Each structure stands twice: as C-alpha cells, then as structure tokens.
Image (cartoon, rainbow, N blue to C red):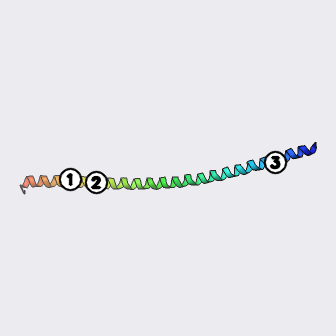
Amino acid sequence: MPTAGYAYAFVDSAFAFVDSAFAFVDLVFAFVDLVFAFVDLAFAFIDLVFAFIDLAFAFIDLATAIVISAITVADCTYSQTTNRY
C-alpha cells in the first residue's frame, strides 16, 4: 500500500505544479494588463495637457475678443463725438 500512497502524492504534486503554472500565466497576464493601464494613464495625461492648452487658447481668444470689442466701442464713441462719419 505505500506504493499507492506515493502514486497519489506524485499525482497531487503534478496537479500542484500545473496549478502553479496556471498561476504564473495569470500573473503574466496581470502584469500585461498593468502595463496597458499605465499606457492608458499616460495617454490620459497627454489628453489632459492638450485640454489645458486648448483652454489657454480659448482664454487668449476671449481676451482678444474683449480687446477688439473695447476698441470698437471706443472707435464708435470717438466717431460720434467728432462726427467723423
């Protein structure tokens, strides 16, 4: 009967080895997923930087529009006071 016990132990160790191999494969997939997550995070930060750049350009456009509007109002006021037109 000890031979049967050894056989069961060998089979159990084989199953343990297969399970550890599957665990290693799962670990590799987890690391790959982690790398993809970091790449996605990097792209998200790049998109955020572009969004801030777009926001800065929008503020510059707004400031330009305000200045042009002020110049237009000043020009209209000047032309009305001097009857230039």
Residue placed under numbered mark 2 in the picture: 63
**Quarter of the image with the C terminus in it:** bottom left
Q: Nearer the viewer, mark 3 or mark 1?
A: 3
**Quarter of the image with the N terminus in it:** top right
Outermost right residue: 1
Image quarter of residue 47? bottom left
Count numbered badges in the picture.
Answer: 3
Earlier-in-chain disc, 3 versus 1: 3
Q: Which mark is residue 13?
A: 3
What is the C-alpha distance between the residues marked 2 and 3?
74 Å
Relative horizontal placement of residue 70, taking residue 48 as reference (left or right): left
The amino acid type found where label 1 is placed reads Ala
The amino acid type found where label 3 is placed reads Ser
What is the C-alpha distance between the residues marked 3 and 1?
84 Å
Is 51 in front, or is 12?
Answer: 12
Outermost bottom residue: 84
Disc 2 to disc 3: CB gap under 8 Å: no
Q: Nearer the viewer, mark 2 or mark 3?
A: 3
Disc 3 to disc 1: CB gap under 8 Å: no
